[in-house]
Amino acid sequence: MKRIVLFISSLQKGGSERVMVNLAEYFHRRRYDVILVTQYRLEEEYPISPEIRRVCSEPDESALQGGRIRNFCVRFGALREIWNAYKPDVILSFLGKNNLMAVATAAFLPSKVAVSVRGEPTMEYEGRLMQMIARFVFRFADGVVLQTEGARAFFPKAVQKKSVILSNPLNEQFLNKRICEEREDLIVAAGRLDENKNHAMLIHAFAKIAEEYPAVKLVIYGEGALRTALETLVEEKGLGGRISLPGNVSDVADHICKARIFTLTSNTEGMPNSIMEAMALGIPVIATDCPCGGPSALIEDGVNGLLVPVGDAFALADAFRRIFEDREFELRLRENARGITEKLSPDRVDGEWEAYLNTL
């Protein structure tokens, strides 16, 4: 039986974490010996099957009483011990510093290491020093999984040659969901309430069309550090009765399926699960055409969704108008968006991940 270790900081709810859990469940069903290694256990994590072993790599607080260098060495040693104990055939790591640690701690071990950048590389590796380290360390990975050609261009030729672009699999709950024929006058968004998601742009754009479409409401699902600032902005716009921020919900599909528009206003994105899921439900999507190209990899502008420039609330407001004013166009976007269900079905995409890891 082949043994695979999946390595990520936590399973707290987010796009990358969901993909990691989906892959763990897929490999478990395929009878791999799956071990899920996380640095932390946090609240509101995605559930996993009890048969999948879960290991935490973070040492006890008592062992982390030294300076930064000593604590780094303790964490390094803890991961190395996990690899030595479980002897995986392949280690698959997600995100930022996890990738660097996976490559470094598995050096000279028989395990193969595949690392995956889940978004814009300059966001995962902020600052010139970290970017230089990432470009260097990735040379020693056995495999590199990226989401877009834009992300691939960040790395030197030596890394590009060993890299592959693999999509995220669609969450199965969105495949089996009945498509709502009757829609409400509702615009929805879902994502962390942080600077990168730029929900302030969405609120500004909604304010520009609020008087033109008095029946339309906006709901932003998610939680984060900017909740108070966004709530203040909503009140400043006088739209407290039209815009709501209900926080995280477990059954996103049930909450968004009746919307006429789904929107994503991020400054940067990898391969956004939220766009894929909305399209699978037949919801017209308006997204920013942001680096490193995830939305544009999913959306053909004017065919199965709409793309607008990053930070341009005026363009977003115009995109809202285009859908609300043209019923035939809206229905065409709905129908074409559903094509994502075949392109990114879990069996197909998970199988591509499995085939790639087996080449290592």
Image (cartoon, helix red, strand yellow):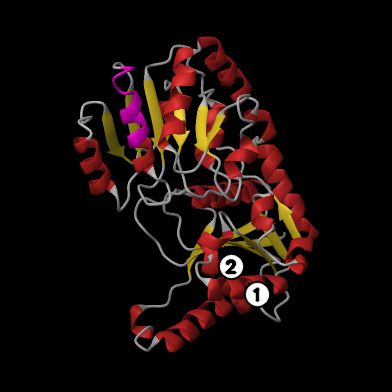
In percent of the image, x 59 and y 67: which residue is there?
99
The residue wearing badge 2 is: 99
For label 2, count other residues whose C-alpha is less than 10 Å away and answer few (under 14), some (14-19) or many (20+).
Answer: many
Q: Quadrant of residue 86?
A: bottom right
Q: Position of residue 174 (x, y in %)?
A: 53, 30
Which of the labelled discs sits on residue 137, or is there none? Answer: 1
Q: Secondary structure at mark 1?
A: helix
Q: Are marks 2 and 1 in contact (CB under 8 Å)?
A: yes
257 vs 152, nearest the viewer: 152
In percent of the image, x 48 and y 79: which residue is there?
75
In the picture, measured across the screen, residue 235 lies left or right of residue 85, that is left
In the rendered image, is residue 257 in sight?
A: no
Q: Nearer the viewer, mark 2 or mark 1?
A: 1
| Amino acid bearing label 1 | Val
For label 1, count other residues whose C-alpha is less than 10 Å away and answer few (under 14), some (14-19) or many (20+).
Answer: some
In the picture, measured across the screen, residue 127 lies left or right of residue 246, that is right
- Magenta span of residues: 203-213
Q: Note whether 87 is above or below 205 in the view shown.
A: below
281 vs 54, nearest the viewer: 281
Q: Position of residue 313 (x, y in %)?
A: 41, 36
Main SS category, magenta section: helix
Q: CA distance from mark 2 to mark 1?
A: 9 Å
Q: Position of residue 265 (x, y in %)?
A: 45, 40
